[in-house]
């Protein structure tokens, strides 16, 4: 079972993101405040769970959370300010929507851009250790997967319904054959280093 708190006397917001390593689509972050005694036996880092379990847990998290929100930074913002800063921006946008009082942020990873005067703690592997961060990882992942499923209907040739925009062989082969879309991150290395052909934008 995951830990339900980092500091017991604080109201903690768990923060995590999904989609940092993708070649297309936004980076998505979630912020979650859970009751101090809430846990779930299946809860874990979203990357360790299958889609069915993630969707089941999403329903449970939303039903039990004191507050939750999702924020996004799109591929144009990623290209402009880089993926790390875009991840922070998505987290801040999620926090902007939280109305429930809180006084601590638990952030998955080793870096974070301060949010106002709220103290934060960065926790490497936090999504596999703390309930609130794991919950945030699941909300971010399921939200982003649903978004990429919708985009896949516009551009089925990139197989986003299966790869969610990550750099799979099929995704890179599709970029090689069809060029890029308005959803691709042009600041990323979209093809393998040996590829030198120019990418055209598909408007």
Image (cartoon, helix red, strand yellow):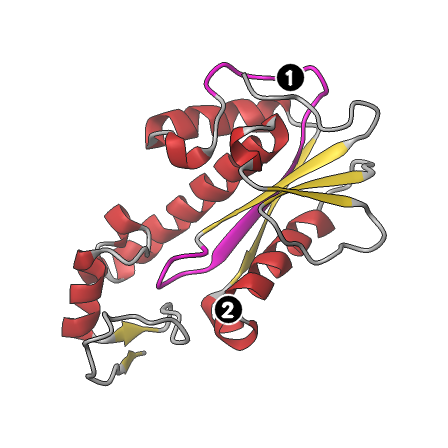
Q: What residue is rendered at 36% in x and 69% in y?
A: 184
Q: Could you give the CA–CA distance between mark 1 and mark 2, rounded to whole angstroms? A: 35 Å
Q: Earlier in the sequence, mark 1 or mark 2?
A: 1
Residue 175 in the image: x percent, y percent? 21, 70
Q: Secondary structure at mark 2?
A: helix
Q: What residue is rendered at 56% in x and 26% in y?
A: 61
Q: To which residue does mark 1 refer? A: 38
Q: To which residue does mark 2 refer? A: 78
Q: Badge 2 local density, few (<14 within 10 Å), some, or many (20+)?
A: many
Q: Give the overall secondary structure of the magenta segment.
A: loop
Relative to 92, 75 lies left or right: left
Residue 56 in the image: x percent, y percent? 43, 24
Relative to 58, 194 lies left or right: left
The residue lying toward the viewer, choosing from 196 and 38, is 196
Whether the residues at callouts 1 and 2 have beta carbons within 8 Å, the answer is no
Q: Badge 1 local density, few (<14 within 10 Å), some, or many (20+)?
A: few
Q: Which residues are magenta?
A: 20-42
């Amino acid at each position: 079972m995951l830990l339900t708190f980092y500091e017991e006397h604080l109201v903690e917001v768990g923060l995590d993101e999904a989609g940092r390593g993708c070649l297309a689509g936004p980076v998505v972050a979630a912020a979650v405040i859970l009751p101090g005694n809430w846990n779930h036996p299946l809860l874990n880092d979203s990357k360790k769970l299958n889609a069915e379990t993630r969707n089941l847990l999403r329903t449970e998290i939303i039903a039990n959370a004191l507050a939750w929100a999702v924020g996004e930074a799109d591929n144009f913002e990623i290209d402009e300010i880089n993926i790390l800063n875009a991840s922070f921006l998505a987290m801040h946008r999620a926090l902007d929507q939280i109305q429930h009082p809180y006084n601590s942020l638990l952030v998955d990873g080793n870096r974070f851009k301060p949010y106002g005067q709220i103290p934060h703690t960065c926790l490497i592997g936090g999504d596999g250790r703390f309930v609130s961060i794991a919950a945030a990882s699941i909300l971010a992942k399921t939200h982003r997967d649903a978004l990429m499923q919708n985009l896949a209907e516009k551009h089925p040739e990139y197989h986003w319904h299966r790869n969610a925009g990550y750099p799979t062989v099929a995704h890179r082969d599709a970029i090689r054959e069809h060029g890029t879309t308005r959803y691709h991150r042009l600041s990323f290395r979209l093809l393998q280093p040996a590829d030198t052909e120019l990418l055209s934008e598909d408007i």
